[in-house]
Image (cartoon, rainbow, N blue to C red):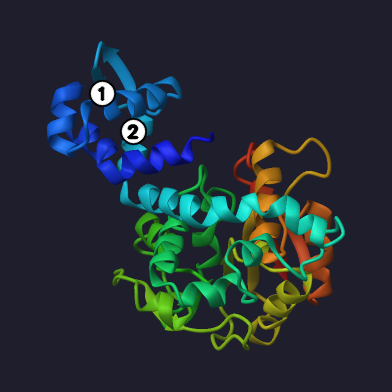
Amino acid sequence: MNMLPAIQAGCEMGLFRTLTESEEPLSIESLSEQTGAAPTLLRRILRYLTSNGEVTETGKDCFEANYRTQALAAPAFQDSIYWMFNIGNPTYQRLPETLRKNGNTDSSKELPFQRAFNTDMAFFGWSKQHPEYLRTFQSLMTVPHDGDWTNVISIPSLAMSVTAEQAVVVDIGGNVGHQSARLRARYPDLPGRIIVQDLPETIQNAEAIEGVEFMVHNFFEPQPIKGAKVYYIRNILHDWDDEKSTQILKSLVPAMDAHSLVVIDDMAVPDTGSHWWPACLDIIMFSFFGALERTESQWTDLVSGAGLKLIDIKSYNSTTVDSIIIASLP
């Protein structure tokens, strides 16, 4: 058994939140009173969680929170667990039979997600019909990665000549604006506009962020903001195959000027010796979207195929190879 069922059970019981909110270790009896779970069940769940490091055992039938417990108590992490347990797990379990049906190729004519949920719809269209799954997916996307893309590119330098009316960053497919909020908090005096674009069902869930604008926009359509310094695309293109990703990039070209950059924030997988996490994400991208985590050479081909010039690929996390792929007009 993987850990997700036990962790999801702990989330539903309020176990991680109860331990995190306590300033001292809690006994089984106290946890039972506060969560409503039977002591015998708590012992079994906590035995498994402590053996995997999710909770710390301080003595017989006594437990306290550690940094993993604290993370699992956070709403965005709990939404992530909920989504992975209810949507991720059923999808991954259908991978082998889907591959068999597809002739053991990575053809996307039927995906494990579609087989798991008995649908011919793509994930994003299907999720619109299931608001709770869409909400938790949006929440999962806000969980921060290690590292910060702004550490390897100087946004203030790019913004030096920007006027108040000009866009400095257009955050394309920016969800509820979590990256733009971080950018504005880091550089509160950054000149120019920061604009988050996404679909209506996402924008309507976004809370107001001081110094950040929200705009409804489909990134397959022509980009309406002209001459921005940075068109920022985070964790979008790995959801789409090369044909669709090329369409997304091409939609930016007419809006760009000579000083505009496209900054793609995604994994750039090494051609050899990949860490397990990018390799795992690649299988996940195929299972849900028929897409992929791209290697550096694949990024080069994709960018040039969209009529752009690759300037650089800079990693800001050497382990997970989270990187920015920077491109301009030729």
User: Where residue 240 appears, x then y in whole percent?
Assistant: 69, 68
Residue depicted at 44% across the width and 68% down the height: 134
Q: Cα distance, mark 2 to mark 1?
A: 9 Å
Q: On the image, which quarter does residue 41 sit in?
A: top left
Number of the label disc, if any, that sits on residue 64:
1
- Say whether residue 238 is left or right of residue 42: right
Quarter of the image that includes the C terminus: bottom right
User: Where residue 293 appears, x then y in whole percent?
Assistant: 71, 55
Which amino acid lies under the numbered mark 1 shown in the image of this protein? Glu
Q: Which residue is mark 2?
A: 69
Number of the label disc, if any, that sits on residue 92:
none
In the displayed structure, would residue 292 be above or below residue 18? below
Determine the secondary structure under disc 2: helix
In the displayed structure, would residue 88 be above or below residue 327? above
Residue depicted at 45% across the width and 76% down the height: 195
Label 2 neighbour load within 10 Å: few <14, some 14-19, many 20+: many
